[in-house]
Image (cartoon, coloured by chain):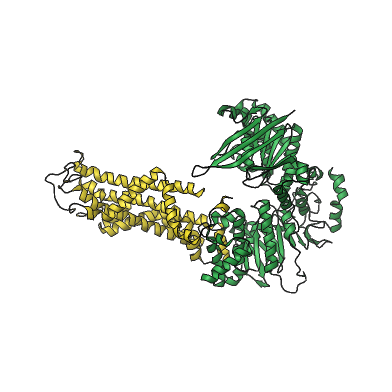
Amino acid sequence: MGDLVQVSNLRVVAGNDAGKPVPIVKDVSFSIPRGEVLALIGESGSGKTTIALTLMGYARPGCRIAGGSVRIDGAEVLDLNRDELTALRGCKVAYVAQSAAAAFNPSKTIIDQVVEVVLIRGLMTRAVAEAKAIDLFRALALPDPEQIGGRYPHQVSGGQLQRMMAAMALITDPALVIFDEPTTALDVTTQIEVLRAFKKVVKDRGTTAVYVSHDLSVVSQMATRIVVLRHGEVREVGLMEQILHAPEDAYTQALMAAARPARRHALSTVAVANPAPPLLEIRGLTAGYGRRDSRGVPCNIVLKNIDLQIRQGRTLGVIGESGSGKSTLARVSAGLLPPADGTVLFNGEPLAPGLTGRTRDQFRRIQIVFQNADTALNPSHSVARILGRPLEFYHGLRGAARDRRIKQLLDLIRLPVNIATRRASELSGGQKQRINLARALAAEPDLILCDEVTSALDTVVGAAILDLMGELRRELNVSYMFISHDISTVRSICDDVVVLYAGQKVESENHRPFQAPPYHPYTDQLISSVPEMRSGWLEESGAVQTPPYVDPVNCGTDLCCFLVRCPVRINGVCNVAMPPRVTLGNGNEILCHHSDADLRRLYSPSHMRTDLR
Amino acid sequence: MTQAAAPIATDKAVATSGLRRAGQFLMALPLSGMIGLGIVVFWLLTAVFGPMLAPYAPGAIVASDVFDPFSARNLLGSDYLGRDVLSRLLHGARYTVGLAFAAALLASITGTGLALTAAVSGRWIDEVMSRMMDALISIPSKIFALVMVAAFGSSVPLLLLIAAITYVPGAYRIARSLAVNLNQMEYVQVAVARGEGRVYISCAEVLPNMIHPMLTDFGMRFVFAVLLLSGMSFLGLGVQPPDADLGSLVRENISGLGEGAPALIMPAIAIATLTVGVNLFIDSLSRSRRTMGEV
């Protein structure tokens, strides 16, 4: 059938302030055979989205397509005039953006927006278009396909909205669909459903697609062919199997290595039965936001009855999806949010709930590192000032002594000394995150609370930060509370793990987390949702099971927080009483009605195969 | 990658970076901004050096006729008493520019200070202060000024105080919204978790990041103050004779309107150029900062 898309020698430039053009896409060529999915993969700034947009003849404001050719179905896209481009976009080439929430108009129903493009073009009557939209909703495995279109965007979940955006793109039967990081903003358990729906729809319709992503594991489920990009240049083009198993280019190899995290540092040698009190101990913690009632209970409770311990020199991973209360846990430990109930003990001594009442030494020993280094460093301060302040504040260092210590700190985080005079805005993302970490280290703390410290970074840069954290732990014997939504990161650096779901601790694991089942049903879902970097994984990992029927729940009873989604819930047990904390044979403690033996039987490999295929 | 390629700052570079920044800043200004800056500088110089340059004393009657047109002896003609308009303008600019500048400065500093206090203090202090400012902002500025002048009689310190009080709530509102937003930034949260005091947080972490928008706001307050003071003088309640600011000059020569006397037109043009110039400059500031920020 030949190639649907042929891109040759494509060049895109961006004009900077002085009017000098900076090339951002350099001489890129590739082609896509009909009915295939091509992945554009690379880090931020590699030009992957820019290239994808040129397939619609579009360059973002400030950018300009400087040369080359983009042919779709034999027609040159770059020669089209305005009207012809309008006809191309949405009809022949469709686009699925990263943030569906931002792409939908909140004041119109979803079905109106899905059929909008065909009505504007006059391609179908409204009734035909709506029938087709409903077919697409069904194909994308959306619940209640006939009715769901009548809802407004805020009335459906993020994963559902993303699938509806795909329906919007597919309604004109486009020859080419561009998926631009469509699952990056989703939780893993949602991502797998969306991926499965996308894959089915693309396969059934024989759609040619471009899949833009930074995540190799996701790409390996979708694509047949991969283009690896870096700094606007093609590093390697090849079939997916070849790229995954025998990458030729050095950069592709680095990318693969970073995406397969190895165990980063040896497990802590500190015995669990250490007689000393744990460094940080949280008992019966309940916290939330909003107005407090007469008993001091806030109206939005985010964390409920949390117990956990961090021992000296160990790393505790806190994992959960967005909204599970992970960041709130860090804020409570740092004293930024006084808890409604429960105590926080540090070295066996209770800490004051809020900021007032904590001593300067207590402040020094617990440091917090935030996710986003762009907002965590004051843009009007130099690096020297950012690092110098905690030295001055906690250790009274001034003048030459302080400068010497700043140099040592920069050395510790492997940054050149001359960076000290720069401002935060003049640093790269990885450099900022290192400074962010160094500021915490300047206090010489015992415990560092790391809130999603690598989530905003590219894989390779994030891997370097994790390596650095491991080295620092060995050298300085600090402990970390490592908050993340990424199970493979947590698995690679943490000694102990706490799994949060809807503000409750559903599982805690000591020693080599996520190594030996059984797990809590939610943890199991979390683990099995992380894509593996091989093709066919998506097909092998069965569809999410529909939870078995349970009788309606009486209002006001405290129940398992995972009840609604749990695939192994039991009628008459789970919907009646709060589950107990059970210690399993492998030492994991879970909040569940199932016993060790039950879970082993329910999640045994043979059971999974027969049940899910 | 562009960051990595940026030149490494040495000690010498740091010393000259102030000058270089100023140069870069000028170059980044659009044409309208340069014109505005030129006008602002011109009026500032006039306010400082004007009286020294004036050919006659402001009160001296030097022309033989009233409402003279432009002439070699009286460059901008003469006023309703036959005084030299240029000299009176050069003296009057000092009142208008100086008073408005002082009032705007007072209003901005007070507003920013109160806003920072409100932002880092607890909910109650914030609430009480904000409601008081709301009450103050609800009083029309002209009426407030008229009542104050009626009660205490017009004097330069009173005018300064009136203009400052009038513009504190506006500056407070802008500064508070900036400070409250900045207070949520993670670097402020880090400082709070470090155990820093309120004074350090507001002065070292919050204030430096709101100074640019507050400077823009200061320019706007300055223009408002010029217009308020000129309006007061036009009503005869502002700067009192024998002194005169630009507004008084317009008022006292109002009878020359029919003849199109320069004595009336020149001070009016002076007020117009001053306000337009400041506005042009301020508008270009926010625009040039945007483009500089992208580098």
Q: Between B102 and B174, which is closer to the camera in this rendering? A: B102
Indicate the chain coloured yellow by its letter.
Answer: B
Indicate whether B37 appears above or below A449. above
Taking the image as shown, residue A61 lies to the left or right of residue A216, namely left
- Position in image of residue B105 (x %, y %): 37, 57
- Position in image of residue A499 (x %, y %): 73, 57
Q: Between B124 and B81, which is closer to the camera in this rendering? A: B81
| Residue for point 59% across, 38% down | A12
Residue A98's image quarter? top right
Indicate the chain coloured green by its letter.
Answer: A
Does residue B104 show up? yes
Q: Between A459 and A609, which is closer to the camera in this rendering? A: A459
> Which quadrant, please, contains the C terminus of chain A?
top right
Taking the image as shown, residue B201 lies to the left or right of residue B29, namely right
Residue A92's image quarter? top right
Indicate whether A372 appears above or below A270. above
- Position in image of residue A109 (x %, y %): 62, 36
